[in-house]
Amino acid sequence: MDVQNEISAIVRKALAELPPAAVEPDPRGNLRIRLGTRHRPLQVLWAGDGWPSDVRRVVAASTPWPRSHVVVARRLTRSAVDWLREHDANWIDGTGLARIVTPDGILVVRQPLEATTDSGPKTQPFSWSDVRKDVAEVVLSKREVPRAAEIANETGWSSVAVAKALSSFDASGWTAKAGAARGPGAQRRLAEPQRMLDAWAEAVAAEPRTTISAHATFTDAIGFLNERLALPLNKINARWAASGWVGSQVAAPYVTSSPTLHLYVDAATFDTQLLSLLQEVQIRVVTEGARIEFWRGRQVVFAESRRHPTPVADPPRLYADLLRLGGRAIEAAQNVREQLIDY
């Protein structure tokens, strides 16, 4: 199916109740959506599969959003929709989701339709187990595909489990064999790191977190971390790494202050010592109004963390965690991607 026909099918599904919609090229060859004869056409910005990077690729950085433009994609991811909402943008996707405000008074706001109502061909989403997420994190963080034994050492998973995860990345086209197919000379390379990062970050941003929430008063989150928490954590040989707003402020400055402090702590410390440590340093555990969140981190988080000198989660995880926070943090995530990841 060519792009014009694909866009036509997406538009018909999302805008079925509006005046007859037609997708046609304008005099310069760009596609546009014409809604009957009474409304000005909308210029199509085709975002393909709908990952955040696809959206950013087609959307010019303009404020306010041009009301005559509309992003169209096969299926916009949650992070992509969050980004579009932050920019007050128009969009349509193949699930039936649409949000359009035009200069001449058309208003469309629709929630996604269930995928099962689509009788067309379906692509199974990639299934992200903890093993696959950890292996992908090493690959994305190192910007190459290490040997399975090296990845196993950094993640704590078996070499067999790592090898299976790598094979699943090959099948998705994110990595590819290079050199010998098997044996000591077998190697892999990153084939589509941008797509892999988009899919992995979406999965990490949506995963459940084992969390301890706390409250403390501070104006300088980095200073508070270094003065009140770093020394006690180091004293008990805890492994920890900042992420979220503070991680962004340290590794890729985007704002001058951090409203909340997000900290990964290794599983052993988190499970057995963290609560007593917080009591010792007079930081109160709360169920609401938290300014500090401690996340139980798997081994890979600390194996790939960076020192600035404050330990910070690796750039791909920092990017995913900022996407998870939403709101203005999405812009900080983009800044991390541009400064520290660059794909």
Image (cartoon, rainbow, N blue to C red):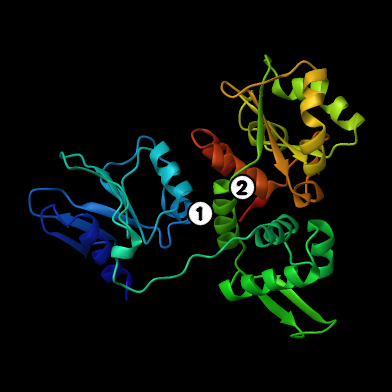
Circle 1/circle 2 CB separation < 8 Å: no
Determine whether, in the image, residue 314 is placed left or right of residue 236: left
- Residue 54, image x and y in percent? 46, 56
* Most foreground residue, 41 or 92: 92
* Most foreground residue, 3 or 271: 271
* Mark 2: amino acid: Arg
Q: Residues within 10 Å of mark 2 (few under 14, many from 20)?
A: many
Q: Is residue 147 visible?
A: no
Determine whether, in the image, residue 219 is placed left or right of residue 70: right
| Residue lying furthest front | 272
Q: Quadrant of the N terminus?
A: bottom left
Determine whether, in the image, residue 120 is placed left or right of residue 185: left
Q: Residues within 10 Å of mark 1 (few under 14, many from 20)?
A: some
First along the sequence among labels 1 and 2: 1
Vertically, is 21 above or below 163? above
- Residue 227, image x and y in percent? 82, 20
* Mark 1: amino acid: Ser
- Residue 222, image x and y in percent? 74, 25
Q: Quadrant of the C terminus?
A: bottom right
Vertically, is 335 above or below 150? above
* Most foreground residue, 124 or 246: 124
Vertically, is 242 above or below 192? above
- Give the spatial CA distance, label 1 vs label 2: 10 Å
* Most foreground residue, 289 or 150: 289
Residue at which label 2 appears: 337
Find residue 53 and name its label.
1
| Label 1: element kind | helix
